[in-house]
Each structure stands twice: as structure tokens, then as C-alpha cells.
Amino acid sequence: MKKLWGGRFTKTAEEWIDSFGASISFDQELVMEDIEGSLAHVQMLGSCGILTKEEESVIKEGLSSLKVKAEKGELPFSVDYEDIHLNLEKLLIDEIGPVGGKLHTARSRNDQVATDMHLYLRHQVEEIIVTIEEFQKTLIDVAEKHVETIVPGYTHLQRAQPISLGHHFMAYFWMLERDKERFTDSLKRINLSPLGAGALAGTTFPIDRHMTAELLGFEGIYENSLDAVSDRDFIAEFLNHSSILMMHLSRFSEEIILWSSQEYRFIELDDTFSTGSSIMPQKKNPDMAELIRGKTGRVYGNAIGLMTLLKGLPLAYNKDMQEDKEGMFDTVITVKGSLKIFNGMIATMKVNSSVMKEAVYQDFSNATELADYLAAKGIPFREAHEIVGKLVLSCIQQGCYLLDLPLETLKDASSLIEEDIYDALKPEEAVRRRNSAGGTGFKQVSSAIEKARALLSLD
Ligand code: ARG
């Protein structure tokens, strides 16, 4: 098959070699972006007098007709034309004749592909930001319902201090807020136009890069043509920001998996987000959470893959860069899917508040309360810690909890302990009284929720 670039070649490549070099199987994902970029390019060529108005309008019509066919999935792509750019050029020439060959004036596939990727990622990142925000809204709703639901808080996966369940969910809200900020910030780098950088050095034609940038909704242009065609930082950033986001979802998944186990029974996932076992009839598995935890690995892989791909590349374009796409597409699909599933899973899960409460009452996570109580009465905290530690030990030996100890026993440990200790030791009180800024006290949690709502312009 004669290539569109075949002029200086005497041999045609064999099919199996062509197919190794081709990217059309995956870069057809960029079909709309490629047409959009071409429409802007040809309009600029017409305005700058590089093509005649007549040529401009014939090419535009041809491109528009390809667009209609692309929307219906009717464009016959072929591996013979390597990638989406050459396939579209060939289809354009088929559609309108040799004048279609003028579209590529003052352009290279190198600035063309970079432009496509910028357009693609802008759109996807904008969608991801919206999807994060939808999930954040769900978290606010669930947190609001559970401001006063108490649950053990953990460190080292050992019960540490009782907390508000709403506070726990809001921790994820703030993580997602940072994820959203990172994606939002990256938009200013994604939203730059490489178009007009040519193969690497610019062009001799009197083009107007600002015009194409404006037509494509870019905020500005790359200042350096070499940088424009060889920069993939914006994709690397996207993949790394996605990795951090997935790491958050993966940690959350881990908790969902633990919490829905028979050992915890803190939550029950809706049937829709669970699956059964083919052999064990009693099983209800948190598959979706496990899968999101698992998919985090491939998102990390895509990020490290691109970083490795780029690290040894001299300027400017190198064919290696064709490998930048599949990981990006895969991460887009994985991140959007994971966020949507997580949103549904959290919105529909059942919270077993009574099991959580029981867990909080049947442990020593109020021990800090007793130490704080003594410290507030003037005993150095370190001594208070020791006194309470001994009480905990004697409870463990007797098989009871701090709230079960009679006042005399407590007074034996420290004469400063009064009747009011029983209130202070109640887990609800322990939570309520943690009213320091950002703490788990009910008032703090409510005001954090209010802040979060304002941030999302809800209400
Ligand atoms: N398919 C190529 C890619 O994705 C397009 C750019 C090719 N440019 C070139 N000079 N071979 O990177």
C-alpha cells in the first residue's frame, strides 16, 4: 500500500510491520478532536490567505461531512493509514478530491497529535472534576445524616478514640477536594495550543497561531515550537493526579471492605454493588470496592509507564510518544468509572449504627478521656497516662471496661476522680467535647459540613 508519505520510498512495508507501527486501533478515540483541530486550522489558512476562500470552504464542508459520519460510527478506518490523522486525511481526499491534500499545509502530525491530546484531556478533566463533585455531594449528604453516629476511630487499626461517623466520611470529602484542586490547576497547562509548531521548528507560512488557539478555546499558545510538540507533561500530570485520586479511593475501598466484613458489620452494601459466590451460597462480596482497590494498580502503572517512556527522549517528537495514548485512555475510563461506582456504593449502603455504638462501648477508646480528666485537674498528663494505663490493665484482668468500675476503685487510683467521671467517659461525650478546630466534636463536624456545602455552592 502506497503511503501518504511514500514519495521517497522505493519499497512498501509488509503488512505485519505496518500493523506494529499503526495506532489507529486506539487513536481513533481522538477522531472528534482531530476534526475539530483541522476545522480551526483550515479556517486560519483561509483567513491568512494561505488557502483561497474557496479551498477553505470545500475542505470545511468535507470535514463536516466526515464529522457527521464519525458521529454515526461510519468512518472506515484502516491500518493501512497508520493513525487517525492519516486516516482522516485519506478519507477527506476521497470525499472532496485532491484539494483535501491542502489541509496539511503548514501543519505536521506532530503539532496535530499534540493538539488532539490537549483537546481530549481538557474535555475529560472537566468531566472528571464534575464527577468528583457529584461524589463529594453524596459524601456531604451521608456525613450530615451521621454527625452524631459514633464509631471507633482507629490508629494502627486498633481502636483509638471514638469519633463521629460524619467526621470520618468528611475526611474523604477533603481528600477529594484536593484532587479536584489538582485537576483544576492542571487545566491551565492542558489548555494551551501547540498547533502551528509544525514538525518541530514552526513554519515558513504566515500562519496565525493565536487565531487557531482562540478558535479551539485554548487560553494561549506554547511559546516554543520544540516544547510544543514534545511536551507530554500535561499527560504525566494527569496520570499522577489520577494516581493520587485512586490512592484515596483505594484507601476508602479498604475500609468499605473491612467494615462490611462479619468481623466489623459496620455497614452493609446494597445488593446492586455486591456479588455472590458461585459455590458459597451465603456470600455477599464487596466486589466493586475490591475492584477499585485493584484498578489503582493499573492507574499507577500508566503513570510510571509514561514517566519511563519520556525520560530518555531527546527533543523533539519521537515515535515512542505514540505510546502515550493507551495509558491515558485507560486511566480516563478507570477514574470516571471508579468515581461513579463509589458514589453509588456510598449513597446506597446501610449503616449499622447500633453495631458501631456497641463497638465503641465495648472497648477502651475512652481511656484518653480519663487521662484528660485527671490532667485537667492538674495531674501532669504523663502521670495521668500511667494511672489510667494501670486501670485499663486491671479491667482487662477482670474482664470489664472503664465505665463498669465502681467509684471507690477509681478513687483508689486517684482521689481527684468524682462522680462526674461517668459522664466524661461516655463515648458520646468524648466525641462531643472534642471541639477543637477540625476535630470530631459534633459542632465542628456540622460546621465543616457547612463549609463544604459553601465550597460546592450548595444550598
Ligand atoms: N501516531 C503518531 C502519534 O501518536 C502521530 C504523530 C506521528 N508523527 C510522526 N512524525 N510519525 O504519536
Image (cartoon, rainbow, N blue to C red):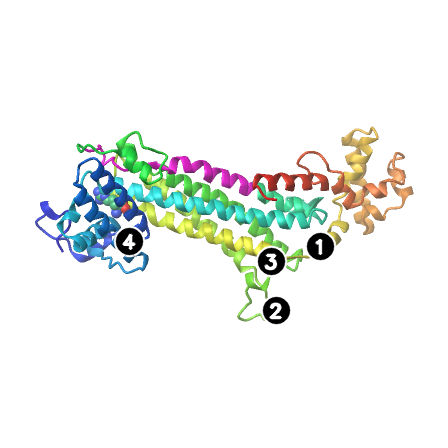
Kindly give the residue lying farthest to the front in the view shown.
Answer: 54
Q: Nearer the viewer, residue 424 or 363?
A: 424
Between the residue at mark 4 and the residue at mark 1, the CA separation in whole angstroms equals: 54 Å
Q: Nearer the viewer, residue 412 or 373?
A: 373
**Can you give x and y, in whole percent of width and height, for residue 377 in the image?**
84, 30
Could you say whether the residue bearing mark 1 is in a helix, strand or loop? helix
Q: Are marks 1 and 3 in contact (CB under 8 Å)?
A: no
Could you say whether the residue bearing mark 3 is in a helix, strand or loop? helix
Q: Nearer the viewer, mark 4 or mark 1?
A: 4
Q: Is residue 437 magenta?
A: no
The amino acid on which the numbered mark 4 sits, given as a three-letter code, is: Lys
Q: Report whether the residue tagged 2 is closer than 8 Å to ligand 1.
A: no
The amino acid on which the numbered mark 1 sits, given as a three-letter code, is: Ser
Q: Is residue 380 above or below residue 401?
A: above
Mark 2 lies on residue:
282
Image label count: 4
Could you say whether the residue bearing mark 2 is in a helix, strand or loop? loop
Between the residue at mark 2 and the residue at mark 4, the CA separation in whole angstroms equals: 52 Å
User: Which residue occupies 37% across, 48% down?
Assistant: 327
Q: Nearer the viewer, mark 1 or mark 2?
A: 1
**Can you give x and y, in whole percent of width and height, for residue 383 in the image?**
79, 32
Q: Nearer the viewer, residue 120 or 267?
A: 120
Please tell me the numbered disc located at residue 348. 3
